[in-house]
Amino acid sequence: NAGVTQTPKFRVLKTGQSMTLLCAQDMNHEYMYWYRQDPGMGLRLIHYSVGEGTTAKGEVPDGYNVSRLKKQNFLLGLESAAPSQTSVYFCASSGWEVSGANVLTFGAGSRLTVL
Amino acid sequence: AQSVTQLGSHVSVSEGALVLLRCNYSSSVPPYLFWYVQYPNQGLQLLLKYTTGATLVKGINGFEAEFKKSETSFHLTKPSAHMSDAAEYFCAVLYGNNRLAFGKGNQVVVIP
């Protein structure tokens, strides 16, 4: 019963380096999301996807790109990392509920430090 | 636009005392509201949610929340705090394309 799995859990980058965070879900969910969490800021939505092959910008998309080539995977890319992208990144997914209040299931997080 | 306000980033409560975390929302449509909890170094877990119907919602670990439309509030309570309740709590409102807008969170510290 894996749910939402994020890799890697920890990463240290130098300014200007690139990297990709991988999110995988095994619940056949349509929706997937990437959030970042910073102290005192709550969680802010970076990008999201409403289905395989789709992506859309969230609240704080600058400096990030995403892809959803397969329904179960949602990749978050940093092309040129900046210290301001030091954060904890959470992936989440959700399916459909009869009530319409679709519950998001979160991964354990990926802690990224940019030096 | 939908938004959520949680006041008081840190909340201290004595063991056995009432836990009260306040949440006010802004929504242009009837809201779906959520409380999530985050334990140290973990992801977020659903505590409870409000959709429609009964305005008093019961969740896991003895928590409950009451939806008050007139006050645009969804405050979270627990009658008696336990040491294991130490965590960060987030209120959230659902909006277009099944997205969640989160409040800034309350870090709860339980004092023995």
Image (cartoon, coloured by chain):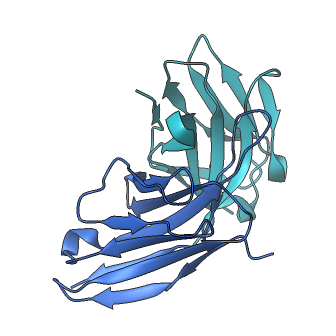
Question: Along the horizontal axis of the image, is A19 left or right of A27?
Answer: left
Does residue A82 lie above or below B110 as drawn?
Answer: below
Quadrant, the C terminus of chain B: bottom right
Work out whether A37 lies above or below B11. below
Residue at image location 70% in from the left, 51% down from the top:
A95
Residue A14 % position (x, y)? 21, 89
Percent x, y of residue B80: 79, 47
Where is residue B60 drawn, in percent x and y? 82, 50
Residue A3 figure quarter: bottom right
Tell me if residue B110 can be seen.
Answer: no
Q: Chain B's colour? A: cyan
- Depth check: give the residue in front, B41 or A22: A22
A96 w.r.t. A40: above or below:
above
Q: Quadrant of residue B39?
A: bottom right
Q: Colour of chain A?
A: blue
Residue A59 at x, y = what percent?
34, 47
Q: Is residue A39 left or right of residue A62?
A: right
Q: Residue B19 or B22: which is nearer the viewer?
A: B22
Measuring 81% from the left and 75% from the top, which residue is drawn there? A1
Q: Which residue, as the protein is rendered here, is positioned at the far top?
A: B70
Q: Is residue A12 visible?
A: yes
| A10, B71: nearer the viewer | A10
When asked about the image quadrant of residue B18, the answer is top right
The residue at the point 45 percent across, 38 percent down is: B7
Q: Give left or right: position of A82 versus B12.
A: left
